Amino acid sequence: MNVRPNHHRRSAPVRALLLALLTVLAAWTALPAATAQEGRIKGWGANDNYQLGGTLTSAKYKPVTIPGATGSSIDSLAAGYYHSLSLLSNGTVESWGRNAEGQLGIGSTAAQEQASTVTGLRGVVAVAAGNYHSLALLADGTVRAWGRNSEGQLGDNSATQRNTPVTVAGLTNVEAIAAGALHSIAVLADGTVKAWGYNANGQLGDGTTSNRITPVTVTGLANARSVAGGSAHSLARLADGTVWAWGRGSEGQLGDNTTTQRITPVRVDGITTAREISAGVYHSVARLADGTVKTWGYNAQGQQGDGTTTNRPAPITLDGATNIRAISAGGYHTLVLDRDGRVSAVGYNNQGQIGNGSTTNQTTLTTPVNSLSSISLIAGGGEYSLAG
């Protein structure tokens, strides 16, 4: 439920140049449906809110094509609890699924059974999806947000729901973004971290449990490179390869070998070479430099992949995950993508989100998801999965 991290840090002039290029590219090369590479995005799992597009149906236990997704080149995917985003190479964004809170950003609250273009966005370089809200990072280092805002998760100094993008107040020089369930997080070019929205469990990391309708600084973090947001906890990956966590800890999702809530960041035990992080509802995942994966936190559905349903308050190795290039934590399941373009999954499978043709929970990593090959992007939603 978080954005794939932006690993390349750009100076302000470079960002400005990139914004100009992307704006021109969007105007000149927006691809019409007739010439676009359709059918690239696949999905499986729940479809009760058009998460997989098409007609409202029961869950899909094997991958199906998301209708209307017309990007010839997709840079990233983001999956919320009931809605999804795809970032196209021309800097525009498409969305589909539930829209009662305006999270699709199309100027209405009508659900969309196929991918539709988010209103007014150009020059986007990263996207993130929370439970009912969405974020976009622009090449100029500013952030846009839309959707539910009752907890301040849009960061525009209000609690007003928005069905088109608004600017997050006071943020510039942003390098990476992430969306938790009801909160949002950003990494600045100087390595500091900002957060805003719901904070009952300390997931904003500012030493309080007060909601914030504009961004506040996460206490004590420096040299951050990427962030991730769960239901009520947050993660940050630092330049030195360590991972830090804060917020709700009762399921062990902070990885500090306790079940203690933290309102400021604590270091996750034993991780020193992290290259990517992701957060599910109550569990956390990290990809290491050697291509292996660590998991920790809630495990009642087997999302830790160790063959048990025992919660893990400190990181363990995800058995069978080797040569991994990308990770994504869904609500209660975990996805991994290997360097051969194959997707595997573990955990909750009530809606077929593991993609193996069944609805049986998996406590060990499955063989690659049926019918998928040459995949380069993955995203785990609430009870569904995406790949492209």
Image (cartoon, rainbow, N blue to C red):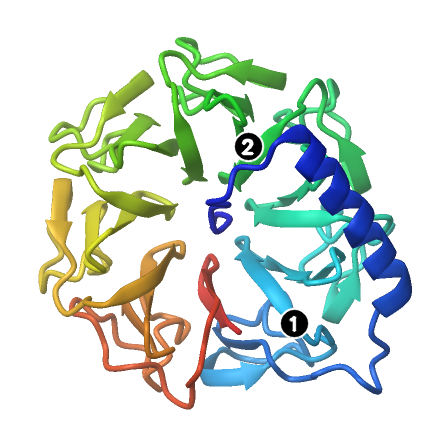
User: In which image quadrant can residue 361 be found?
Assistant: bottom left
Relative to residue 175, is residue 104 depicted above or below?
below
Q: Earlier in the sequence, mark 1 or mark 2?
A: 1
Relative to residue 345, is residue 16 depicted above or below?
above
Left or right: residue 104 versus residue 51 is right
Percent coordinates x, y for residue 102 in the rendering: 76, 47
The residue most toward the right is: 27
In the image, 140 versus 267, the foreground residue is 140
Q: Residues within 10 Å of mark 2 (few under 14, many from 20)?
A: many
Percent coordinates x, y for residue 218 in the rendering: 44, 17
Question: Residue at the spot x=39%, y=9% of the render?
Answer: 207
Amino acid identity at mark 2: Ser
Question: Residue at the spot x=19%, y=56% of the render?
Answer: 290
Question: Residue at the spot x=19%, y=66% of the render?
Answer: 321
Numbered mark located on residue 148 in the image: none
What residue is shown with label 2? 184
Q: Residues within 10 Å of mark 1 (few under 14, many from 20)?
A: some
Secondary element at tag 2:
strand
In the image, 233 versus 29, the foreground residue is 29
Relative to residue 138, is residue 158 depicted above or below?
above
Q: CA distance from mark 1 to mark 2?
A: 27 Å
Left or right: residue 229 versus residue 288 is right
In the image, 103 versus 48, the foreground residue is 103
Residue 149: tell me if it is visible. no
Front of the two marks 1 and 2: 1
Percent coordinates x, y for residue 325 in the rendering: 34, 63
Amino acid identity at mark 1: Ser
The residue most toward the top is: 207
Numbered mark located on residue 73 in the image: 1
Secondary element at tag 1:
loop
